[in-house]
Amino acid sequence: MTAAIETAALVKRYGKKTALSDCTLSIPTGHVVGLVGPNGAGKTTLLQLAVGLLQPTAGQIDVLGHKPAEDPAQLARVGFVAQDTPTLSTLSVADHLRMGAKLNPGWDAYLAGQRIEELELDPDQRAGQLSGGQRAQLALTLAMAKRPELIVLDEPVASLDPLARRKFLQSLMASVAEQQVSVVMSSHLVADLERVCDYLVVLADSQVQLSGTVDDLLATHHLLTGPRREPTRWPSDWLVIEERHTERQTTLLIRSSAPILDPAWAVETVSMEDLVLAYMGLGASQHRRDGDLPGPRRAS
Amino acid sequence: MIEFRLQTHSGVAPYLQLVHQVRQALRLGLLHEGDQLPTVKDVASAVAVNPNTVLKAYRELESQGLVSPRPGRGTFVTGTLSDASLVEHNRLRRDLERWLAKARLAGLDEESIEALFVNTFRSGSQAESA
């Protein structure tokens, strides 16, 4: 099956600054993918490479099996809503739809009209007079009405109030159910991602720290608490993501597909937020150790 | 028709929350055999949840024999959660009340009681599933 986004040793540098280094990733289609990471981790860079707004410094990126923005057909396959959900402030809602129809061969005027009606947007109103939530919805409408196979959203709800955010996610999920479009969206709002995403990618320190379906990730990560242990003797099939020791207690976040049988450990399931925080921290601690072993340490 | 809701930070997977809500509605008599569940799109849109999550919940309910999909029409309730258990509720509640009284007498506060109950319940269900 063709991947929604597939990268191999992808690198992007801006002058001396490395935004993405050695990024290898394969995201299947048919998911709503949450892309999370600290500011400056390379999320926007990755998304802009995927839609062809940026060119890689080195390495490969394929989107739905093609080079980003290689021809008009590829442009039609991918919808993009940039950060701050840009619209043209002097043009009316109706103007935006007319422009969408002119620029996009696969434009679905019925869908666009229906969404504008559902959102109760006045077609004659200028985009500059819309609320932030309405502008975001208009931008999503434009991206959806071109009937893309993949829609890429860069922090679409970051600047919205909670109600507008919920409404945006509701219409996004309705579109996903209706059009079976794959979605890749970056966000800091893990609570939102927990609702809408079934695939998670954590980017930190310009590298992919974690990638997989949410079900798999939650099923294979465990939080263990128990009496203090020496930190060198973990079972070989454990990947220790995070470890903390006090005089008496050891707390571990591990990845293991085998069940934890040792009764000395109290085993708890993890939430998406636990995972995101742990793997984001992994990027940060790597940075501190400056060039130490990349990625989680496999127990010896 | 029932309305779903979703709690994040509850530690319960979203699809399981939906499953529980249908089971709860069946137990309380809010859903009956023959009732239709909301469509996947309606739930996804109303709750702002991934459609795959709703599908997964409906498949789980199907495997429990509680609902079944009718192609082109939607998902319908086909099972009940035995009314017989409702009759037992009162007796079990009285047992539980007696147990609670004992726990308080032993000096446990609300928090300790809850922790003890949840712990026992968890280890019980883990032993069952193991």
Image (cartoon, coloured by chain):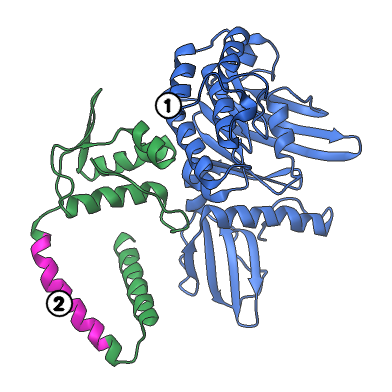
Residue found at the far right of this picture:
A16
Pointer 1 and pointer 2: residues touching (CB < 8 Å)?
Answer: no
The numbered mark at residue B94 is 2
Supply the letter of whichever chain is blue.
A
Residue type, label 2: Arg
Residue A21 percent location from the top left of the image: 79, 39
Tell which of A45 and B63 is nearer to you.
A45
Judged by its main secondary structure, the magenta piece is helix
Residue A105 visible here:
yes
- Position of the N terminus of chain B by quadrant: top left
Q: Which chain carries label 2?
A: B
What residue is shown at x 59% (from left), y 26% (from top)? A139
From the viewer's perspective, tell me whether residue A149 is left or right of residue B86: right
The amino acid pointed to by label 1 is Glu
The boundaries of the magenta stretch are B85-102
Judging by the rendered image, the residue that carries numbered circle 1 is A118
Left or right: B78 in relation to A53: left
Q: Is mark 1 on a helix, strand or loop?
A: helix
Tell me if residue B89 is in the magenta stretch: yes
**Which of the 4 image quarters holds residue B98?**
bottom left
Query: Which chain did the renderer colour green?
Result: B
Image position of A25 with respect to B29: above or below: above
